[in-house]
Image (cartoon, rainbow, N blue to C red):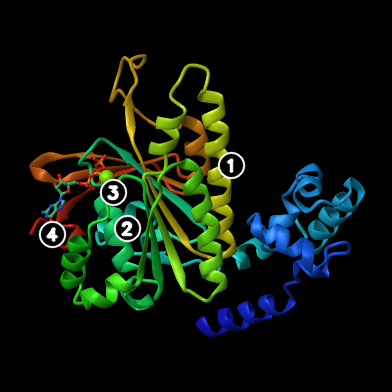
Amino acid sequence: MAKEEKKEEAVVEQVEAKLTDIPGIGPGTVAKLEAAGVYDLMGLAVMSPSDLAELAGVGAAVARKAIQAARGMMQLGFTDGVEFDKKRQDIHYITTGSQNLNNLLGGKGVESKSITEAYGAFGSGKTQLGLTLTVSVQLPLEAGGANGKAVFIDTEGTFRPERIRQISESLGANPDKVLKNILVARAFNSDHQMLLLDKITELIKDGEPIKLVVIDSLTAHFRAEFSGRGQLADRQQRLNRYLHQLMKLAEQHNLAVYVTNQVMANPAMMFGDPTTAIGGNIVGHASTYRMYLRRGKGGSRVAKLIDSPNLPDNETSFFLTAGGVKDEEE
Ligand code: GTP
Ligand code: MG
């Protein structure tokens, strides 16, 4: 089966058209598009004619035709179930380090071409899971990895090389090699956070085998920058655009995206746990898998799956250890 997949990938790559195949798009326009983060037909296909006209300095009619052509070549639209199933065949999973947690996510961990979100209070394990994933993505496929590199976008200064070393050692991996395969960037504000997504696309274009993108935290900058009254709609719109870009990145490059999210008290809620995730429905709808993490008994952590498209809502427990996320305490 692995061979089959390889063959199919090769075929898909061969027939993939370039931006310059579009009538009205020459090398000069391509340069402008690339500078704006549009690298391929999909990027063009999802643009609005007015955006393209402005960005590339072309007329409205040319822009409309170019987008139509891109959409035609992409064959955007409906696919039947068999085709859909084929598209999902190259999906891979990255182990969380805990079989319990993997099971919660469908059996094998965090899925490629998807966004997995963890929200919860401070100390619930969101960052530790992210750090663990940056190590396990480097494992070979048979060990639950993706044989790839990780990108860690750090908005809060939580990336800890010494934790990576400990987690690597617990998995029997060489800590220096592991650290080399994690590309860390500090995002200073939400614009910067957005810009870094284009950088990831560039890295992949340059041949970096990036199979995981961690964003810790997804929402903190957006929350801080749009905290005033009347700014909520603005914030949600920008967050939505960001999540859209993220999903596109995940789908186009078959990589897994893991994002963390804070909680806030919801005073309107009278029963149950009165905490809700920042970003509300926008983030909820964009995340393919959404987990709520909290402290459990005996130092454990509890993960609850919320609104998954193909898995029942469910709960499980795991531990945070020196060696990262595990089923058992050390
Ligand atoms: P915020 O970012 O503050 O919202 O929290 P978070 O959910 O990201 O928390 P994080 O993942 O950083 O979890 C912190 C917890 O992980 C600590 O309270 C410890 O319980 C645990 N932890 C961190 N490092 C180690 C370690 O080296 N050994 C062990 N046993 N536990 C650790
Ligand atoms: Mg954290």
From this view, report whether residue 299 is shown above or below residue 275: below
Type of the residue with mark 4: Ala
What secondary structure is found at the residue carrying circle 4? loop
Q: Mark 4 CB in 8 Å range of ligand 1?
A: yes
Q: Crowdedness of circle 1 by 10 Å Cα count: few (<14), some, many (20+)?
A: some
Q: Is residue 76 left or right of residue 255?
A: right
Residue located beneath label 1 in the image:
241
Q: Nearer the viewer, mark 2 or mark 1?
A: 1
**Corner quadrant of residue 12:** bottom right
Residue located beneath label 2 in the image:
102
| Residues at marks 4 and 3, CA–CA distance in whole angstroms | 19 Å
Type of the residue with mark 3: Gly
Residue located beneath label 4 in the image:
322
- Residue 36 lies, in percent from the top left, at 65, 54
| Residues at marks 1 and 4, CA–CA distance in whole angstroms | 36 Å
Question: N-terminal of the two: label 2 or label 1?
Answer: 2
Residue located beneath label 3 in the image:
157
What secondary structure is found at the residue carrying circle 1? helix
Q: Nearer the viewer, mark 1 or mark 4?
A: 1
Q: Nearer the viewer, mark 3 or mark 1?
A: 3
Q: Crowdedness of circle 2 by 10 Å Cα count: few (<14), some, many (20+)?
A: some
Looking at the rendered image, the quarter that the C terminus falls into is bottom left
